[in-house]
Image: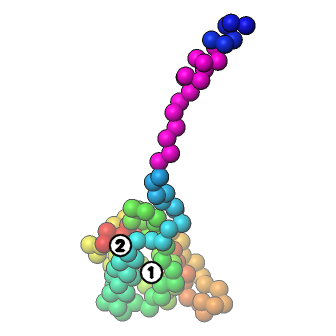
Amino acid sequence: MLSMLIFVPLTMACQPQVESVSEPVVSPEQPASESEGVAEAGLSTALEGIIESKAADVEITGLTVGAGASSAVEINGTAMDNATIAVLLEAMESHPGFSNVYLVSTEKGGVESAGRRVFTMTTNYLG
């Protein structure tokens, strides 16, 4: 019986002490920062400038910017033909704001695209 009385105080003395610390928790659902919005605006402006300078018949239908510090971008769009997509790709490759420009896919568009080519590209936007 005596050994049990000694054991209980030892286990209580070995318990870790927990202190409650009140720190703000950052949620992944928080809205994007202003710098990310500025980067997207710069990306859109750069693409519009390339399309206008080449007088290319291209319509950008979607831009997906990588999360966080990633500069990866997916660009979806339609163009008159594959030659027009090639002009856009080459112009982006020579632009200082883009690197690693790749054509992922191109295919004949459906009814809503009225015979245009639908394409997907990926690139890194350097800003």
Whether residue 121 is in magenta: the answer is no
Determine crowd level at label 1: few under 14, some 14-19, many 20+ residues with C-alpha closer than 10 A.
many
Circles 2 and 1: CB atoms closer than 8 Å: no
Q: Which residues are magenta?
A: 7-21
Whether residue 8 is in magenta: the answer is yes
Q: Which residue is mark 2?
A: 35
Report helix, strand or loop for mark 2: helix
Report helix, strand or loop for mark 1: helix
**In the figure, is residue 19 to the left or right of 45?**
right
Q: Amino acid at mark 2?
A: Ser
Q: Residue furthest right?
A: 1
Give me the residue at 44% from left, 91% from top.
57
Q: Residue furthest top?
A: 2
Determine crowd level at label 2: few under 14, some 14-19, many 20+ residues with C-alpha closer than 10 A.
few
Image coordinates of residue 40 in percent, x first then y, are 40, 77
Q: Quadrant of the C terminus?
A: bottom left
Q: Is residue 41 visible?
A: yes
Against 55, residue 120 (above or below) is: above
**In the figure, is residue 87 to the left or right of 6?**
left
Against 55, residue 119 (above or below) is: above
User: Which label belongs to residue 85?
Assistant: 1
Image coordinates of residue 70 in percent, x first then y, are 41, 62
Image coordinates of residue 108 in percent, x first then y, are 59, 82
* Residue 6 location, quadrant: top right
Q: Quadrant of the N terminus?
A: top right
Q: Amino acid at mark 1?
A: Ile
Give me the residue at 67% from left, 7% from top.
3
Q: Nearer the viewer, residue 13 or 123?
A: 13
Name the mark nearer the viewer: 2 or 1. Answer: 2
Give me the residue at 45% from left, 88% from top.
58
Give me the residue at 53% from left, 71% from top.
105
Q: Is residue 98 visible?
A: no
